[in-house]
Amino acid sequence: MKNIILLFIGGLVTTLAAKAQLKEAIFYPNIKTAQLFVSGNQLGYPVMNLNGSERLELHFDDLDANVKNYSYTYQLCNADWTPAMLSSFDFIKGFSYQRINTYRISSVAFTRYTHYSAVIPDNNCAPSRSGNYILKVFLNGDTSRVAFTKRFLVVDNQTSIAAQIQQPFNGEIFRTWQKIPFQVQLSDRLQVMNHLQQIKVVILQNSRWDNALTNVKATFFAGKKLDFNTENEIVMPGGKEWRWLDLRSFRLQSDRVAKANYSPRATEIFVKPDVDRSQQRFVYYRDIDGMYTIETTESINPYWQTDYATVRFTYIPPDNVPFPNKDLFLIGQLNGYNLDDSAKMVFNNDTRVYEKTLFLKQGYYNYNYVTIDQNDPKRAASYDNTEGNFWDTENDYTILVYYRALAGRADELVGITHVSSLNGRKGIQ
């Protein structure tokens, strides 16, 4: 009986683990500025073709400033980022993990750190199936000692996708939301008997998964063509062009820096206070859609010749009164779009403003503010009180098409396309 109970508990734990979504996260406080992007393009979302020539770059810093034994491996996931019920031998070609051998001790910086980098995939360790992947970076060959995780995609393109951005017909959201109608043409290689079960579609706004549209259903299906044109499923709030912070130089203070304190071993940056923009008139300017780039204007290599600073953000609420029954968050790629304590602004009763401190590397950053209703069980983030939503906003949308074969055990990524909300707009090139 005891063995039966243990087997039952073990099976239950395995089932619950399989249903848990895997997210990007940093588990050790000494890990900073973890990046994974298309080789040579810090703003390129990490996507590569199955068996293609594309490569991704992995970069991260260890503030312990010594040399450690870091390795990485892959975990194949389904469209909803739950782990695929497959052995690593089914989705990794070659060795199951690869050691990171390229590192450099920082120089020309007060903050001491070791910068690690790798080109992915390695010829000896590469994904062998299409789909969603979690890259796990771990210590000393022990896969249970995960330092951080990053998401990336491997696509086996077997579809053609035609998409555009329109204003919704609904008068309530006509001026504030954006509609993403599109059509998907499946190739003959895909054996689709039931598109509702075998085809899954996800829409990302500015490469974000925290507000992604998932389980988008086709309005019409005929033969190998799926049409998506529902008014209530393929619309998203437009938001506003992102706020910016130029930290490429700590010595030459940019327009968004109020002041800086310099000491022999550290730098402290005070960002100019931010205010509510929801009632301000919309103005278009080029941003980088919430992302950041590690850059410097005063040295050669930005990855190991740049410094860190303690950066203090301030948000002044209307009339210096805290939002009733709402929490305020600072979001952007700079904190992984996380809506947890690492991004939560704290209201200072003495100064009557919200405050947040981050430890950031030299570079160029986009960020915004959102509120979450404390009584909302879904914890939906809103721009209504901080930024506003505008149909005119420039957003980049990514459409992902997944397929699962009959009796298949994992979702395959078989289609991807990008479309900008500026495409086809009059007067915009």
Image (cartoon, helix red, strand yellow):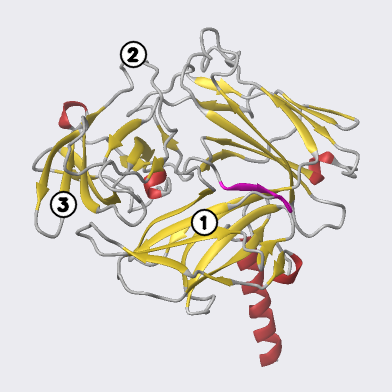
Q: Residue at x 46, y 45 (%)?
A: 377
In the displayed orientation, state which residue is furthest to the top.
Answer: 427
Amino acid type, label 3: Thr
Residue on which the image places disc 3: 267
Pointer 3 local density, CA inside 10 Å: few below 14, some 14–19, many at least 20: some
Q: Relative to 284, does residue 73 appear above or below in the rendering? A: below
Q: Is 50 a magenta residue?
A: yes
- Residue 394 at x, y = what percent? 48, 23
Labels 3 and 1: the sequence-earlier one: 1
The magenta segment is 46-52
The answer for how far apart the CA atoms under marks 2 and 1 are is 37 Å
Q: Residue at x 37, y 61 (%)?
A: 61
Residue on which the image places disc 1: 150
Observer-side mark, 3 or 2, equals 3
Amino acid type, label 1: Lys
Q: Residue at x 16, y 43 (%)?
A: 251
Residue on which the image places disc 2: 281
